[in-house]
Image: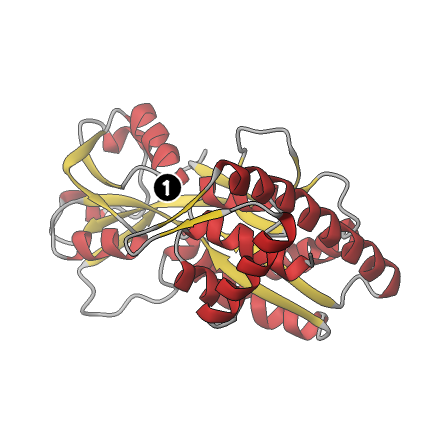
Amino acid sequence: MNLRELEYLVAVDEECHFNRAAERCFVSQPTLSGQLKKLEQELGVMLIERNTRKVSMTDAGTAVARQARKILKEVKAIKEITQSFDDPMAGELQVGLIPTIAPYLLPEIIPELNKNFPQLTLWLHEHLTAILLEKLKNADLDLLILALPVDTDEFSEIDLFKEAFWLAVPTYKTLSRKNIIKMRDLNEQEMLLLEEGHCLRGQALDVCFTAGATENKAFRATSLETLRYMVSEGIGMTLLPELAVPKKRHPSDTINYIPFSEPKPTRRIGMLYRKGSYREETYQKIAQVIKEKLS
């Protein structure tokens, strides 16, 4: 039995598909399948049920995969310990970000992080909050950048910045003539929002509730860019986080982006990592660079 075989088993357990599991592990499907058969022979028990339609785990396979995750997590911790003693700002980090942050924050911070920490390789993953938290718990990811707070006390957090919301409104709307939006301006207005699963949806709903606005339930977007497109087509208005607001407005743009008056509605952006991680120094230094870049 070796660690690669355990990684293959966990991948099959989570993907329920040999080809996808093989792609995830960067091996061919025959290699992955052959190694898992070898593992079954060594353990003397069937771990995976195979047929032409689907792949499913046996009860034994599920139990072994659960234990394998614990083993792989501890191996990762050992690597973190040795890395922290060698050079905390070298090596690899698996970093997860939510979709309403990743495409807007990464262009701002990646060049700065590469310049400050040239020996550090960041592998970036974009998922919804619930998926990111599960991957962090299972040690598939080392560090998350997302909206805080999260409903768990399993992880340590580092505050990065507060991000204000802006109103994105079609130019034909009366509100588009304003330079500053007050919360009461949204009273009885309908807002376009993201679909369930995005933490930004809940934050936007809080703003709507406070302002007396309602959701346009005829449409829910899968991304901020879909929301932007709907606003540009005159379908309605929405709230966008400041990083998603264009720095320069094109003359042909059919959207006006308007800031709120004080106190502005905001969201907290921060980092999460497993408590007790030996790479805490690494995370703190990354956080410092991000704060300085965005200050």
User: Camera-side residue: 48 or 105?
Assistant: 48
- Three-letter amino acid code at the position of disc 1: His
Rendered location of residue 81, percent (x, y): 83, 54
Which quadrant would residue 66 be assigned to in this image? top right
Q: How is the image coloured?
A: secondary structure
Figure quadrant of the C terminus: bottom right
Figure quadrant of the N terminus: bottom right
User: Camera-side residue: 264 or 195?
Assistant: 195
Residue 261 visible to the viewer: yes
**In the structure shown, which secondary structural element does the residue marked by tag 1 occupy?**
loop
User: Camera-side residue: 250 or 243?
Assistant: 243
Which quadrant would residue 36 be assigned to in this image? bottom right
Rendered location of residue 10, percent (x, y): 54, 50
Would you place residue 19 above or below residue 216 in this image? Answer: below
User: Camera-side residue: 181 or 15?
Assistant: 15
Asked if residue 133 lies left or right of residue 127, the reply is: right
Rendered location of residue 3, percent (x, y): 68, 58
Badge 1: residue crowd in 10 Å (few <14, some 14–19, many ≥20)? some
Residue 147 visible to the viewer: no
Rendered location of residue 184, percent (x, y): 28, 28
Residue identifier under label 1: 198
Asked if residue 243 lies left or right of residue 184, the reply is: right
Identify which residue is drawn at 67% across, 75% down: 115
Asked if residue 166 lies left or right of residue 269, the reply is: left
Identify which residue is drawn at 45% across, 68% down: 29
Would you place residue 193 above or below residue 76 in this image? Answer: above
